[in-house]
Image (spheres, rainbow, N blue to C red):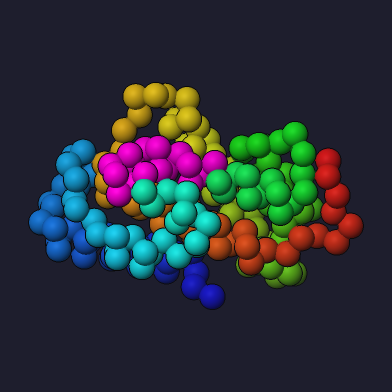
Amino acid sequence: MESFYTLFGRIHELNEELKTQVGIEHADSSLKTTGLSADTFDLLITDSDLKSKVKKLFLDGHHARAVEEAYKYLDNLVLRLSKQQNMTGSSLMKKVFSQKDPVLKLNEGISASEQNEQLGYMEIFSGVMTGIRNPRAHDSDWEDAEDRAFQLLVLANHLICKVRSATLKKNSHAI
C-alpha cells in the first residue's frame, strides 16, 4: 500500500502536470477556472459514490459546495460504517479512529508504525472535519479555486478509500 507521503507526492505531481497542461502558474492564488476535464476528474476521483455526489457540482463551477458535500459524505460514511450515533465531525473521527481503542481499525495496530498510522489518520480525519468541511458548511461566502477544490476532492477520495478498507472492531455497537 502506498504510504501517505508517497500518495501526497503523487497528488502534487499530478497537480503540477495539470497546471502545466492548462497554463496556470499561480493557481492557488487565483479563482480562475483551469478547465479541468471530466476525464481527469474521473481518473482521480475513483469512488463511485463520491463521484456521483460531487462531479456535477464541481464541473459546473460550484467548487466549495463540491468540497463541502465530499466531506459531509465522508462524515456520514464513517458514522454509518462505525455504527455510532449522535456524533459528527471531529469528535466522531477521534472516537472512531482512536489509536488506543479504534472502532474502525486501519491496520492490526501491533507495531509502532501501525499505531502511528492509526494515530496520524485519526488526526487527519479529525482535522479535515474542522479545517475543510466546517468553513464551507458555516460560511456561505467561502470560495475555492478549481485546482484547490480538486486537490481537496482527491484527498477526500483517498480518505474514503481508507474508511472502506478499515475493519470494524469486533463487538462494536452504537454509542
Percent of width and height locating residue 128: 51, 43
Residue 28 lies in the magenta stretch:
no
Residue that extends furthest to the bottom in the rendered view of this protein: 1
Q: Residue at x 61, y 37 (%)?
A: 89
Image: 124 above or below 4: above
The reply to whether residue 41 is visible in this rendering is yes
Residue 61 lies in the magenta stretch:
yes
Query: Left or right: 7 with respect to 103?
Result: left
Q: Quadrant of residue 161?
A: bottom right
Residue that extends furthest to the left in the rendered view of this protein: 23
Q: Quadrant of the C terminus?
A: top right
Nearest the camera: 19 or 101? Answer: 19
Image: 107 above or below 77: below
Nearest the camera: 120 or 72? Answer: 72
Q: Residue at x 16, y 47 (%)?
A: 26
The reply to whether residue 148 is visible in this rendering is no
Query: Left or right: 100 with respect to 34?
Result: right
Magenta residues, as a range?
Answer: 57-72
Nearest the camera: 126 or 165? Answer: 165
Q: Residue at x 45, y 65 (%)?
A: 46
